[in-house]
């Protein structure tokens, strides 16, 4: 998944994100580093400084998602509901599907979440638009 040429793309330590049609789109860097808790906190603070605590729909390209630790899953489960109305994830392989299902299975999120296949980005965006 790539950003269209007419949008501002923001880079973090682990990936890139941009808004497209009111949806926050996110991709992970292929060799993204594992963040320390201090780095995660700093990245979250940068995001809040840029966008405030508005809620949005999130489209994640999960091509390079790596399994998270229990602490990382717990932190995401605490933080994401503050910002997210719904999440659509493009899953590229069985490991990615396992990672997503593990996250959802261990702690059901309080927002809609749906998995899509590569090439279904437009379908995922249409699904997310109902939650804008």
Image (cartoon, helix red, strand yellow):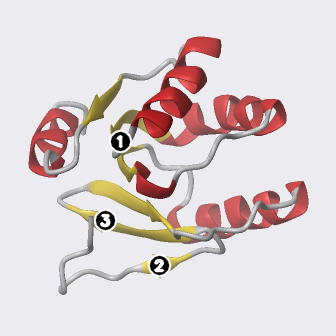
Q: Is residue 92 left or right of residue 67?
A: left
* Residue at the image point whose x is 50% and y is 30% from the top: 100
Q: CA distance from mark 1 to mark 3?
A: 20 Å
Is 66 drawn above or below residue 75 in the view shown? below
The residue carrying pointer 2 sits among few (fewer than 14), some (14 to 19) or many (20 or more) residues within 10 Å by Cα, namely few
The reply to whether discs 2 and 1 touch (Cβ–Cβ < 8 Å) is: no
Q: Is residue 28 left or right of residue 107?
A: left
Q: Is residue 56 visible?
A: yes
**Quadrant where the N terminus is found in the figure:** bottom left
* Residue at the image point whose x is 59% and y is 26% from the top: 103
Residue at which label 2 appears:
10
Q: Is residue 96 left or right of residue 77?
A: left
Residue at which label 1 appears:
91
Which of the 4 quarters of the picture holds residue 79? top right
The reply to whether discs 2 and 3 touch (Cβ–Cβ < 8 Å) is: no
Q: Earlier in the sequence, mark 1 or mark 3?
A: 3
Q: Earlier in the sequence, mark 2 or mark 1?
A: 2
The reply to whether discs 1 and 3 touch (Cβ–Cβ < 8 Å) is: no
Please state the horizontal and vertical placement of residue 21, each as a whole percent of the image.
Answer: 17, 59
Which of the 4 quarters of the picture holds residue 129? top left
Please state the horizontal and vertical placement of residue 101, each as a whole percent of the image.
Answer: 50, 22
Please state the horizontal and vertical placement of residue 17, each as a whole percent of the image.
Answer: 42, 68
Q: CA distance from mark 2 to mark 1?
A: 22 Å
Residue at which label 3 appears:
19
Q: Please name whichever residue, 66 or 4, is drawn nearer the observer in this view of the structure.
A: 66
* Residue at the image point whose x is 41% and y is 60% from the top: 26
How many badges with numbers are in the image? 3
Is 121 drawn above or below residue 89 in the view shown? below
Farthest bottom residue? 5
Q: Secondary structure at mark 3?
A: strand
Q: CA distance from mark 2 to mark 3?
A: 10 Å
């Amino acid at each position: 998944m790539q950003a269209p040429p007419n949008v501002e793309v923001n880079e973090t330590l682990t990936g890139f994100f941009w808004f497209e049609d009111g949806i926050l789109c996110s991709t992970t860097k292929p060799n993204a580093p594992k963040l320390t808790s201090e780095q995660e906190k700093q990245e979250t603070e940068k995001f809040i400084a840029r966008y405030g605590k508005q809620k949005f729909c999130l489209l994640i390209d999960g091509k390079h998602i790596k399994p998270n630790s229990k602490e990382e899953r717990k932190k995401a489960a605490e933080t994401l509901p503050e910002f997210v109305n719904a999440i659509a994830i493009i899953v590229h392989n069985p490991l990615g599907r396992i990672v997503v299902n593990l996250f959802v299975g261990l702690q059901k999120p309080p927002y809609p979440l749906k998995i899509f296949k590569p090439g279904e980005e437009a379908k995922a965006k249409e699904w997310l638009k109902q939650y804008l």
